Image: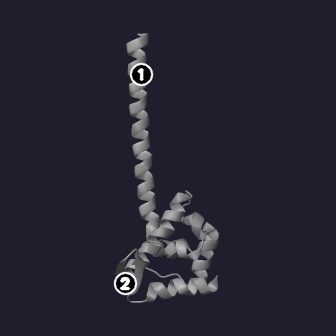
Amino acid sequence: MFQNILIGIGLAVNLSVRLLLSDEVIIVDGTVIRGILAQNIKFFREHRKWSQADLAAYSDISIPFLSEIERGNKWPYPDTLAKIVKAFDIKIHELFRESTLTNKKEHDYTVMVAKEMLIAQKEAADSVLKQYLG
């Protein structure tokens, strides 16, 4: 696990990292990776409905330091990343995945469309019942 953490940190501190997405090569600098890490930590925390105080306690780090990490102002050490990963019960690479937020947005959109469809179905059913049953 420590090796995976070092790999993640190594990716994050490189001035340029090449990520292969299908046939495209996208150049990502350290600032972008820090932002991805910050957003993903916040995403996983909010997904579990944890406050910063909760995650700080589960990870044995200070709330101000966690806040700085979530804002992309501070880099966690490998040991700190290991504690965060353990608290979330996830694999280290999930903190550096660019798609986490995209998947959440897609999920939210799908839920919204499903709700709209259910409302439209209910309205249609009510209309049919009213027309035929008075």
Residue 26 in sight here: yes
Could you classify mark 1 by the number of other residues whose Cα lies within 10 Å: few (under 14), some (14-19), or many (20 or more)? few
Image position, residue 32 (x, y; %): 38, 78
Q: In front: mark 1 or mark 2?
A: 1
Q: Which residue is mark 2?
A: 29
In this picture, residue 62 sits left or right of residue 14: right
- 75 above or below 104? below
Residue placed farthest to the front in the image? Answer: 23
Closer-to-camera residue (113/132): 132
Residue 72 in sight here: no
Image position, residue 15 (x, y; %): 38, 89
In this picture, residue 110 sits left or right of residue 81: left
Q: Which residue is mark 1?
A: 126
Residue in view at x 52 percent, y 81 percent: 76
Of the residues shown, which amino acid type is indicated by label 1?
A: Asp
Distance between mark 1 and mark 2 Cα atoms: 55 Å
Residue in view at x 60 percent, y 67 percent: 88
Of the residues shown, which amino acid type is indicated by label 2?
A: Asp
Q: Earlier in the sequence, mark 1 or mark 2?
A: 2
Q: Quadrant of residue 77?
A: bottom right
Q: How many marks?
A: 2
Image position, residue 65 (x, y; %): 51, 76
Closer-to-camera residue (39/24): 24
Closer-to-camera residue (45/14): 14
- 121 above or below 110? above
Residue in view at x 53 percent, y 63 percent: 45
